Image (cartoon, grey):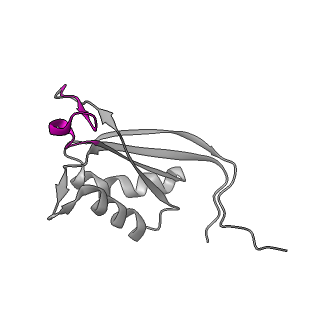
Amino acid sequence: MRRIEGEQVLLRLIFSESEHQRHQPLFRSILELLRAEGMAGSTIIKGVAGFGHGRDIHTINIEIASTGLPLIVEVVDSQARIDRVLPKLEPLMQNVLITMERAHVIRYASREPAS
């Protein structure tokens, strides 16, 4: 396992769960690309409500509007690795909000073996 500690970068992608790429959900295409590129890890979070540039509110509370809920993909890795993967993500990024911020990694490790 590759170790990452200290100052790193958090890349966040926000888009609708209804987005697709090559007949599969966009989140799956992104996840597979990040894994293939050797990123430290990624998490996909499903939102319960949101709105975007179209200003339409999507929420799980309104049955007919519950499609297109927001998904958030988060990746924490070094600036160099994030910079390397961004051009490869670009073809997938049609209706996606992309943000980056500093992240201080305190711990990135698998479970410690029992003593």
Name the image quarter holding residue 110: bottom right
Residue sitting at the far top: 55
Query: Would you say 19 lies left or right of 12 here?
Result: left
Q: Residue at x 41, y 57 (%)?
A: 84
Left or right: 53, with 74 as reference point: left
Q: From what the image shows, is residue 40 above or below residue 90?
A: below
Picture quadrant of residue 59: top left
Q: Which residues are magenta?
A: 55-69
Residue name at image x 53 percent, y 62 percent: 40
Say above or below: 112 vs 68: below
Name the residue at 22% across, 28% down. Answer: 57
Viewer-proximal residue, 79 or 66?
66
Q: Is residue 62 magenta?
A: yes
Q: Is residue 87 magenta?
A: no
- Tell me where residue 106 appears, x and y as whole percent: 69, 49
Q: Report the predominant secondary structure element of the magenta stretch.
A: loop
Residue occupying the point 25% across, 30% down: 51
Image coordinates of residue 97 in percent, x first then y, are 30, 38
